[in-house]
Image: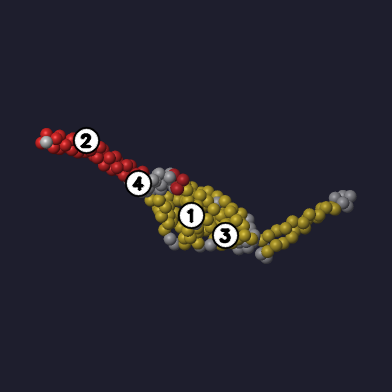
Amino acid sequence: MIILEGTHFLTVGLVDSFSRESTQVHMIIVDYETPTILLSIVIDSQVYSQDENVELTQNDDQPTENNHSFLVTVNDNYYIDKVLFTIIGENYSQTLEMELVQETRHQTSSFVIFLEIGALNIGEYNITITAYDYAGNAQEITLKITVLPAVTIPWLFRGNNLIYFSIGLFDALLFGIAFALAIRRPILNRNWQEEVLTVLYIR
C-alpha cells in the first residue's frame, strides 16, 4: 500500500457494550523528502565550501583559541529532528549532536557545535555532518580539516613584551648617560681647579 506524501488524519472510534462512544483523531505526516544541508559551512564566522581543506592551528599560549565553531543551515519541508557531527582521524572517532541556534521558519534551521582541537593529534580529519528529519530521512555532507601544530612565538614578540623591553632599554640608556656624566663632572672640576691654582702661582 502506497500512502501519499503529506498530512493525513486517522480517526479511531471505540464503542462499548452500553453504546458509549469515544473518538480520537491522530495526525500522521508522511514525508519522503530528505533534508537539505546548505553547502556553505561557517567556521569561526568565515564561510567555507565543503570542497575546501580547512586548516586550524593549535594555540598553546591561549588555549581558548583552540575552540572553533562550526555552523550549518538545514532546510526541510517539515521539521529537523537532529544534526550529528562526526569527526574521524587516525585512531580517532567521535560523534556529537549539534545544537539548534536559530529557526527562521519551520523549514529552515541553523545548528552549531564547538570543536576543541587542542587535544587532537596533528594531521588530517574527515568531518561528516548528517541532518535527520522526524521521518528518518537524512542527508550528509563531508569536509576535511587539517590540524596544524602551534606556532612558537619568541618571548620578545609575545603580548606587550616588546614594549616593555623597549622601555627598559630606553631607561637603561638614560641611566648610562646620566652615570657617564656624573663620573665625568668631578674630573672636569678637578682640572678646572688645577688650572686656577696654576694661574694663582704664576702671579
Residue 176 horizontal/vertical position (percent): 26, 40
**Residue at the location (40% across, 53% down)?**
146
Q: Which residue in the protein does label 2 denote?
A: 186
**Position of 139 relative to 182 (above/below):** below
Query: In whole angstroms, how far apart are the C-alphas of marks 2 and 3?
Result: 84 Å
Q: Are marks 2 and 4 in contact (CB under 8 Å)?
A: no
Q: Secondary structure at mark 2?
A: helix
Disc 1 versus disc 3: distance between alpha carbons? Answer: 18 Å
Q: Are marks 1 and 4 in contact (CB under 8 Å)?
A: no
Quadrant containing the N terminus in the rendered view: bottom right
User: Looking at the image, is mark 1 or mark 4 nearer the viewer?
Assistant: 4
Crowding at dot 4, Cα within 10 Å, few <14 / some 14-19 / many 20+, comes out as few
Q: Position of residue 179 (x, y in %)?
A: 26, 38
Q: Residue at x 45, y 48 (%)?
A: 65
Tell me: 19 left or right of 95. right
What whole-number distance in Å separates the C-alpha atoms at marks 2 and 4?
37 Å
Mark 1 or mark 4: name the one nearer the start of the chain: 1
Distance from Cα at disc 2 to Cα at disc 1: 66 Å
Residue corresponding to mark 4: 162
Left or right: 87, with 13 as reference point: left
**Residue found at the far front of this picture:** 203
Give the percent coordinates (x, y) of residue 145.
Answer: 43, 54
Q: Which SS class for mark 1? A: loop
Q: Rounded to the nearest whole Å, what is the CA distance between mark 4 and mark 3? A: 47 Å
What residue did someone put label 3 on? 74
Q: Amino acid at mark 1?
A: Asp
The residue type indicated by label 2 comes to Pro
